Image (tube, rainbow, N blue to C red):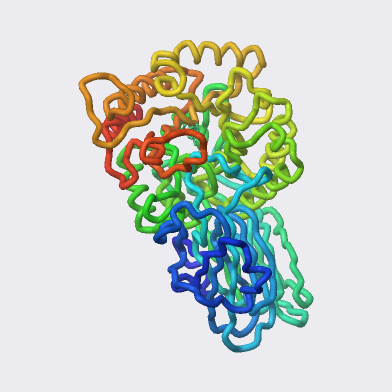
Amino acid sequence: MARLFDEHIKRSVRSLNGAWRFKVDKNRRGEDERWYLGLTDAETVNIPSVWNTEFGLLDYTGVCWYEKSFYFEGNLRLNFGAVMTECRVWLDGEYIGSHYGGFCEFSFIIPSLPAGEHRLTLSVDNTFDKQSIPQAKVDWYHYGGIIRDVEAEKLVGITAINHRFEYTLDKEFESAVARAVIELYNAEDKTVTSKLTYTVGDNVIYSDDITLSAHEYKTVTSADSKLEDIKLWDIGAPNLYTVKIETESDDLYDKVGFRHVGVTPEGVALNGKLIEIRGVNRHEEHAEFGFAFPPSLMKRDLDIIFDLGCNAIRGSHYPNSRRFMDMVDEAGLLFWCEIPMWGWGFSPEALGDPIVIERGAKMHREMLKYYYNHPSIIIFGMHNEIHTECEVSVPLTKKYYEILKAHGGNRIVSYATDKPLKDLCLEYCDLISVNAYFGWYEGDMYGWEKFFDKLRERRASLGIEHKPVIMSEFGAAALYGHHTFDNIHWTEEYQANVLEHALELFHRDPMCCGFFIWQFCDIRTCLEAGINRARGFNNKGILNEQRKPKAAYYKVRELYHKFTN
Ligand code: ADA
C-alpha cells in the first residue's frame, strides 16, 4: 500500500488513484440494472476523496458507484487503503468480492488476466443499520467514498503478501529473540521453488528454499534468532530497522522497531522507564477533505502535535492510514489504535447481537493484520463509551481482550469508559481508560477531585489498584474567536481554564498515568447524533478545523512543556 517508503522495488505497483467515473445511486437500482457492465452518464471524480465534498452531496447517505479502466496483464493484486463503509467489487463485469468496515486495508488477487484494458467497478454504501459498526449515531461525519489509495500490483512467482515480526527483549533491553511470520502466495499456475530471505537491518532471520504449488498460500515461520546490541525505539529516539523480504521474483519492505511497554501499579513503563503519557485525541478528518486526509496535512498535524509538547496520540476512533502511522513511527510518538465501536448508538441488544460481535472481532483481526508491526502503537483500544455498565458487554469485551492479548504482541489493551464507577468490564483491560467531562457535561470543573476519590474507592473495591488510570478524554468546547472577561461556556478562555485545571490535577495524582485531551481540532459532526452541536461541528478542538490555535492550545502547550521538564 502507499506508505512513507516504497514497499516494493521488484514488484511492479501501479497507483489507481486519480480520475474515476462516478454515479450516485439514490434508488439503489445499480445492481439490478447491472451498472457493473459499464457506468453510463457518469461524472468524473478524483480518488481518494469523499463524495460529501461534491456539490449537493454533503449529507448524502446511500450508495454510489465508481469505475476505472486500466491496462494490465498477469496476476493482479488489487489493494484498497480504505473504502467507507461497505463495498462490492467487480472486475470486467465479474463480481470479485466485498468488504465491510471503513477504515482498514483489504485486497483481492485475480490470477492470469489477459493483456488489455480492464474495468474495475465498485458500489460503495455508507448507510448504517442496527448491526453496523459504528451505528448511525456517531459524533463524527458519515462520509462515504474511496477514502485512501487504490493500487494494482503485478504478482510474479512466489510473493510476500504480509508479515509479522515478533520479538521479546531481554531484561536489560539490549538483545532480542526474534522470529518472522511470513505470508506467501504463489501467483503461478505451476509449482515454484525459490529462495526466501527475511532480513531486519543486517540480521538474517530466515534464508532457505521454499516450494509452493500453483496458487498456494503458505505461512512460513522462522526459527528464533538472537539479535545483540539492538538500538531501542523510544519517545524522541525513533530507531527503526528496515525489513526486507525477498524471493527470486518478488520483495516486500517494511520498518520495525524494538521497544517494550509494560503496565505497573505506578503507571506505564516504556523500555523500563515510567512515563507520563501526554496526548491528544485526533480524528483523521478535515472539513474540506473528509476522511481522504492529504499526506501534506498529516505532516502539518504532526508538526503541531510536536510543538504542543505531546508524546502520544489517540487515533480516535478508528485505525488511521498506514502512511500516517509510518510518520508517527518515524516521529517517535506513542499511538493508541482502536476500532470504530463507538458508544451512544449501540443499544444493549446490539451489543449482544452475534453479527455485531463478529464484525467487531473481524475489525480487530484486520487491525492486527495491518498494524501489528508499528512500534508506535502501544495501546490497542477495543471500544469507546459502550454500555459497559450492562452484563451484555462483558462477554464481548472478554472476547476482544483475548484476541488482542493473544495476537497483539507486546501492547496494552484497553477501552475508553465513561461509566467507570459502575463499569462491569474492568477485568478485561490492562489500563483503566476514563472519558469524563467535568466543566462541560458533568458539573463544574472542580468536580474532578471528588470523582477521582470515588474512582480510587471503586478500584480498591474491585481489587484492581494495580491497574493505573489514564484519562482518555476530557475537555470543553470553544468557538474559535469567541472571547469574554467572564468564565462562561463556549469561550476560548473557559476551555483553557477547564483544561488547565484538569491537567494540573491529573499530573499531580499518582493514580493517573497520562491524559489525552479531547480533542486536537474541531471536526465536522453528524447532526443525526441527536445533539445539537454549534456549526454542526464538535468544537472541543484546541485548534479549529483549519488548525488555527485557540487560547487553550497555548495553555496546553505551556503545561505539556512544563510537565516534560
Ligand atoms: C465522547 C466521545 C467523543 C466525543 C466526546 C464529546 O467522549 O468518545 O467521540 O463525542 O464525547 O465531545 O462529547
In this picture, is 62 found above or below 533?
Answer: below
The image position of residue 497, as x and y in percent, is 31, 22
Compared with 293, 89 (above or below) is: below
Residue furthest to the left in view is 485
Provide residue 171's location: percent of width, then percent of height: 59, 36
234 horizontally vs 300: left or right: right
Residue 161 appears in view: no
Q: Residue at x 74, y 68 (%)?
A: 217
Placement of 405 over or under 454, stated as above or below: below
Residue 336 in the image, given as x and y percentages of width and height = 52, 40
Closer to the camera in the image, 213 or 241: 213
Q: Quadrant of residue 344?
A: top right
Residue closest to the eye, 565 or 474: 474
Could you tell me which residue is drawn at 66 percent across and 16 percent down? Answer: 463
Is residue 215 or residue 317 the one in the foreground?
Answer: 317
The relative height of residue 347 versus residue 337 in the rendered view (above or below) is above
The residue shown at (27%, 26%) is 493
Q: Quadrant of the C terminus?
A: top left
